[in-house]
Image (cartoon, helix red, strand yellow):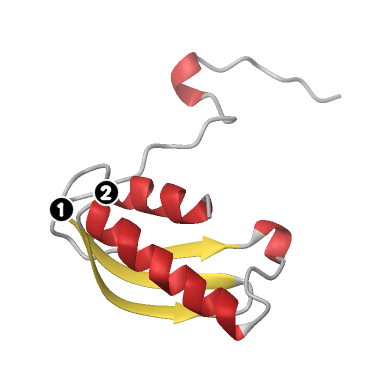
Amino acid sequence: MLRFHSLPPEYDVTTRLPRFVIPGYLPHVIQRGNNGEAIFYTESDYQFYLEKLSEVATKYECELHAYVLTTNHVHLLVTPQQNHSIGKMIQSVGRY
C-alpha cells in the first residue's frame, strides 16, 4: 500500500524553483517546444524568432553571445544584467 505524506509548503512539488541567476554570469539557456514538438517550420520562422529575440534581449538587458536554433529547441548563451533579465526575455519571445 502506498502512503502519501503531506509536505510543508516550501517543498510543494507542483511549483517550479526560482531561476538561479547571477547578473553578469554567462548561463546556457535552453528553450524547447511543447512535448518535443517543432517550433520552427520554415526559414522565415527562424528569421522571425531571431528578430524578436534581438528586440527582447535589448529590452531586458541581456547580451546574446551565441545561439543554436534546431527544429524543436533553442540553445542560447546570454549574459543577463539584472536578476529578472533572462526570465523576462524568454517569456517575451515566447509570446510571439
Residue at horizontal 29%, vertical 63%? 27
Q: Residue 46: give x, y in percent of width and height.
A: 53, 78
Closest to the observer, 44 or 10: 44
Left or right of residue 15, residue 67 in this image: left
Residue at horizontal 49%, vertical 16%? 9
Question: Residue farthest to the right?
Answer: 1
Question: Quick check: marks 2 and 1 in contact, CB under 8 Å?
Answer: yes
Mark 2: few, some, or many residues within 10 Å (few <14, many ≥20)? Answer: many
Closest to the observer, 92 or 4: 92
Q: Residue 12: give x, y in percent of width and height.
A: 54, 24
For badge 1, the amino acid type reads: Gln
| Residue with the mark numbered 2 | 85
69 shown above or below 95: below
Residue at horizontal 62%, vertical 14%? 6
* Residue 10 occupies quadrant: top left
| Residue with the mark numbered 1 | 81
Task: Classify the position of the N terminus by image quarter.
Answer: top right
